[in-house]
Image (cartoon, rainbow, N blue to C red):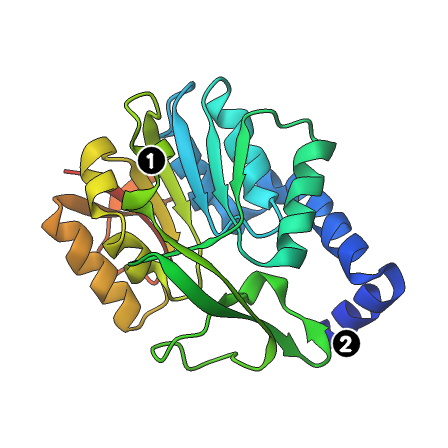
Amino acid sequence: MKNTIKFLLQRILGFRNYLFVFSWYKVKTLRGDRKENDFFQFLELIPEGASVLDIGANIGIMTVHLSRRTGSGKVFAFEPMPDNLRALNRIIRHFGLENVRVFDCALGDRDGEVEMVMPVEGKARQQGLSHVVHETITERNEGIRLKTALRKLDNIKELRDPSANIKGIKMDVENFESFVLEGGKELLQQWWPVIYTELWDNENRYKCFDLLKELSYVIKVAGTSGLEDYDPARHTNQNFIFIKG
């Protein structure tokens, strides 16, 4: 039923208008969504004037809140899918976000090119589930495919500049997080940003855990009264906050 409604809205509004309207609505209602409590706890850890990376910016829902939080700082937003990118730029213009710098590429552990897919389910395009096509990602690979540039965080000079002041990373790249982190280890050790990311319970999660633990990060989750140390025996969270120990 959900995909049927989504398909009808995409058809009636046109896909590009659907993305903009959906993003606008979510921007306006996100703070009231209890499921996003962990994102706003992460946001409180970002100093005003610092810069953040929005990796997997998608259609700009969280980009707006990151931009407002950083103030005089910058948001470096990464989004490779053309339809999502158009919606992201439209949202940036609509909300007058002057501190957002957009990169139209994917991120990984090397520089080059990569294939991506926007899944289609029940005729509805699932823009929020767009991901890199890779042998380790075995679900939701049917849909609209394209090739795009792939960059390694450590090789993006703008982010390594002493003035960048990167203190936060929000990342949602649908099971490709470990590759992004692998390509950004030098950047992480330069800035030690707080990292907020969604990690499903699979091999990718534990690769991320191992990599970040090696860099002396500690794993936190959002609790009812603040951040808590992650305990797999108690917590079923999929969203994690990593802080330098």
Residue under label 2: 4
Q: Is residue 171 above or below residue 210?
A: above
Question: At label 2, which amino acid type do we have?
Answer: Thr
Q: Is residue 224 above or below residue 235?
A: above
Which numbered circle lies on residue 157?
1
- In the foreground, 106 or 199: 106
The residue under the point 24% across, 56% down is 182
Q: Quadrant of the N terminus?
A: bottom right
Disc 2/disc 1 C-alpha distance (Å): 44 Å
Horizontally, residue 12 falls left or right of residue 243, namely right
- In the foreground, 237 or 245: 245
Count of numbered marks: 2
Q: Are marks 2 and 1 in contact (CB under 8 Å)?
A: no
Question: Helix or strand or loop: what does disc 1 sit on?
Answer: helix
Return the x and y of residue 33 as percentages of the image width and height: 58, 46
Return the x and y of residue 240 as percentages of the image width and height: 33, 51
Give the mark nearest the N terminus, 2 or 1.
2
Give the foreground label among 2 and 1: 1
Question: At label 1, which amino acid type do we have?
Answer: Lys
